[in-house]
Amino acid sequence: MDQPSAPKGVNSADRWGATAAAYHKISEAVHPHAQLLIEQAEKRLSFTSPGVRVLDNGCGTGAVCLMLAASYPKVPIVASDLSPKMTEIVSRQGISNIETVVADGMDLSKIRQMCPEGFSHVLSNFMIQFAPDPFQPIQQMITVTRPGGVIGLGTWGSCTVENMFISAVQLVYPEWESPGLWSTRDFPEQAAEIKAWMESQGIIDVETLELPACPKFSSVEEFTTYFFESKNPAPEKLVDSIRAKYGDDGVEKVRSRLPTVFEHGEWDVARLAFNAFITVGRKP
């Protein structure tokens, strides 16, 4: 009998490409965060300033770059992502001031070659914790930011979604331990800690704001389908962990128990949430 395969890492262009079509559910949930990120960046350096050029690092389906382009149609924006399918979604919008580039957020040398003069604003909304080393994308972002320029991040904290899934799994496999939704557990998940780490990298005028993200699901069935079938690498990491230890039958057992967790009243599908943070500062 074949052994169950080991979980795959989440930093994969193919895996992000597989979820691109279904990513709207998450994009809707982080729309307020994209808006807050843009507003906080604008406070530090106006997007109408001379010579402005913006990088959206890990653009996904375009939550930040499309919103920014709508408000500032003359600002040149480079939208980069590891997944060609993600950048294709942005390109299909036909926005004249957005240039899409397939590039790994862990290595922005391609971006530096394209724009050796650097960027006035470098933004990244909820990408870095899916990188094998969540700190490296930020360090890369610093290198392509001009002196006096703005660096802005959206990052995840703890979430009821993972806690809910753990409850469901442990009804079937009490010994199972979650590997976490993100690539590693290293990145800070408290506002003060995020701010302190950014300051340790030499960033000034740092402010971190907390704003929960609440994906909207109309029913337990819709949530269950999304969690197990959307190919989003975050929940799929948990599902892969089950599959690696218990096989496909184990995955189906857990899936069948997920509604039970909601029926017992411990969780409400309308109240699932992620803690999330927007952090913005300037390069001296």
Image (cartoon, rainbow, N blue to C red):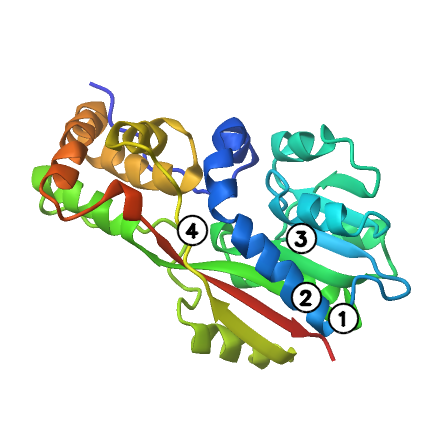
Amino acid carrying mark 2 in the image: Ala
The quarter holding residue 122 reads: bottom right
Between the residue at mark 1 and the residue at mark 4, the CA separation in whole angstroms equals: 32 Å
Q: Earlier in the sequence, mark 1 or mark 3?
A: 1
Is 247 displayed left or right of 174 in the figure?
right
Q: Residue at x 48, y 29 (%)?
A: 22
Quarter of the figure with the N terminus: top left
Could you say whether the residue bearing mark 4 is in a helix, strand or loop? loop
Whether tag 1 and tag 2 are in contact, CB under 8 A, the answer is yes
Amino acid carrying mark 1 in the image: Leu
Between the residue at mark 2 and the residue at mark 3, the CA separation in whole angstroms equals: 23 Å
The quarter holding residue 230 reads: top left
Determine which of the numbered discs, if any, sits on residue 41 in the image.
2
Whether tag 1 and tag 3 are in contact, CB under 8 A, the answer is no
Could you say whether the residue bearing mark 2 is in a helix, strand or loop? helix
Taking depth in this image into account, of 231 and 137 the one nearest to the observer is 231
Q: Residue furthest top?
A: 1
Residue 141, position as x, y percentages in the image: 68, 61
Taking depth in this image into account, of 265 and 56 the one nearest to the observer is 265
**Residue 140 appears in the figure:** no
Whether tag 4 and tag 2 are in contact, CB under 8 A, the answer is no
Between the residue at mark 3 and the residue at mark 4, the CA separation in whole angstroms equals: 17 Å
Amino acid carrying mark 3 in the image: Asp
Amino acid carrying mark 4 in the image: Ser
Determine which of the numbered discs, if any, sits on residue 45 in the image.
1
Q: Which residue is mark 4?
A: 183
Is 42 displayed left or right of 199 in the figure?
right
Quarter of the figure with the C terminus: bottom right
Q: Is residue 191 above or below residue 224?
A: below
The mark lying in front, picked from 1 and 4, is: 1
Between the residue at mark 1 and the residue at mark 3, the CA separation in whole angstroms equals: 25 Å
